[in-house]
Image (cartoon, grey):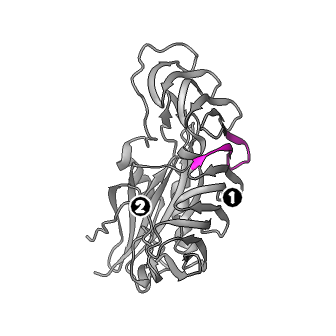
């Protein structure tokens, strides 16, 4: 049986509450998920599963023309998800990246150097559905000025001012339904206040910053409005904490309970669910390649339900729909926990559809 061994992929938080609004929303974190490989063969059909770790990745920029696979690794054209061009300008270099199948722009931006390492100018990023994902400017490798980000449904996600890589002024964040999730206000020295809310409108966290670090007393709340934690910070370091249960009573045990979402039965049970729901469509063949990849981005909310799922790396509408339906039909998970309360998290699931001839 042929197993397609994949590299790493990346995962991020979608939950801002209790942390720096813009930083956590754009932070990639390590998790373990399951890659599901649906295979079509000529004598029999089977599904194989490969578990792997997710790590942060970054694109590799080259001059002229370049092809990349879904992991942003240079590849041959028959394996490519993205196509890039880099051209010399009077002030540096401009790079464009395109979704190949969608024939649409994924990114355009200006760089200071020929290796495209130092961002220096205006950048735009797009989803596979052609909607704008984010836009703003860099100054010698640092975000500078107003940056605006959007959810995959077109609703605004973040609006934040930067001064040479540091957040300054007012930063606001919203949920996909338009409700506000975070408010951060910082002066020129990085001193200010942060508030966040759950999607139901109840307060999620409140605290102060001094010199861009958490300072003093921070309060976190359960989604029912009851206090979940009081934490004392000094120069960004946690000095003391008190936990409260969902009824508002003090917990004697303050051992860190942070966790990522857990599917009942663990990774093996999750893979079985996806195997049951996913399949290689019999009426299709993959031409000029053995394997096709689809990536689904989705969130596990405070109740453990899958929501806000969309195709972040598409292949073909039929395959995309199979992968999306497999994830969207998930039973409830055990939700992630941060600051002693249930939180919403977002991460990616990779599907590989493979053909094996024997």
Res 17 → quadrant? top right
Counting other residues with Cα less than 10 Å from the Cα at mark 2, is it few (<14), some (14-19), or many (20 or more)?
Answer: some
Q: Nearer the viewer, residue 134 or 277?
A: 134
How many angstroms separate mark 2 from mark 1 (CA)? 25 Å
Q: Is residue 52 visible?
A: yes
Residue 211 among those drawn in magenta? no
The quadrant of the rendering that contains the N terminus is bottom left
The quadrant of the rendering that contains the C terminus is bottom left
Q: Give the range drawn in magenta.
A: 166-184
Q: Name the residue under label 1.
A: 153
Residue at image x 62%, y 56%?
Answer: 144
> Which structural element holds mark 2?
loop
For this orientation, the residue located farthest to the left is 1
In this picture, is 105 found above or below 77? above
Q: Give the main secondary structure of the magenta stretch.
A: strand
Report whether 107 appears left or right of 263: right
Task: Name the spot of residue 153 as percent of width and height, x first.
Answer: 68, 58
Residue at image x 58%, y 61%?
Answer: 138
In this picture, is 226 found above or below 19? above
Q: Name the residue under label 2.
A: 57
């Amino acid at each position: 049986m042929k197993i397609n061994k994949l590299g790493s992929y990346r995962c991020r938080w979608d939950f801002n509450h209790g942390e720096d609004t813009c930083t956590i929303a754009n932070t990639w974190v390590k998790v373990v998920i399951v890659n599901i490989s649906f295979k079509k063969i000529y004598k029999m059909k089977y599904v194989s599963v490969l578990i792997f770790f997710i790590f942060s990745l970054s694109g590799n920029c080259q001059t002229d023309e370049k092809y990349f696979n879904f992991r942003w690794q240079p590849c041959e054209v028959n394996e490519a998800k993205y196509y890039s061009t880099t051209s010399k300008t009077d002030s540096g270099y401009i790079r464009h990246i395109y979704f190949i199948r969608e024939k649409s722009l994924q990114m355009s931006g200006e760089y200071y150097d020929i290796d495209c390492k130092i961002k220096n100018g205006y950048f735009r990023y797009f989803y596979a559905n052609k909607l704008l994902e984010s836009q703003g400017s860099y100054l010698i490798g640092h975000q500078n000025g107003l940056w605006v980000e959007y959810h995959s449904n077109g609703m605004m996600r973040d609006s934040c001012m930067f001064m040479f890589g540091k957040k300054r002024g007012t930063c606001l964040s919203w949920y996909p339904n338009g409700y506000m999730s975070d408010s951060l206000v910082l002066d020129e020295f990085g001193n200010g206040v942060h508030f966040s809310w759950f999607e139901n409108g109840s307060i999620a966290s409140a605290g102060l910053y001094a010199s861009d670090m958490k300072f003093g007393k921070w309060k976190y709340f359960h989604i029912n409005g009851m206090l979940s934690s009081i934490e004392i910070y000094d120069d960004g370091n946690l000095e003391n904490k008190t936990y409260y249960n969902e009824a508002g009573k003090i917990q004697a045990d303050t051992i860190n309970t942070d966790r990522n979402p857990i599917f009942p039965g663990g990774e093996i049970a999750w893979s079985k669910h996806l195997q049951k729901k996913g399949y290689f469509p019999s009426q299709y063949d993959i031409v000029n390649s053995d394997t096709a990849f689809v990536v689904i981005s989705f969130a596990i909310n405070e109740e453990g339900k899958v929501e806000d799922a969309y195709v972040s790396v598409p292949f073909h509408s039929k395959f995309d729909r199979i992968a999306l339906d497999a994830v969207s039909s998930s039973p409830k998970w055990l939700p992630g926990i941060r600051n002693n309360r249930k939180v919403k998290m977002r991460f990616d699931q990779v599907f590989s559809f493979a053909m094996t001839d024997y």
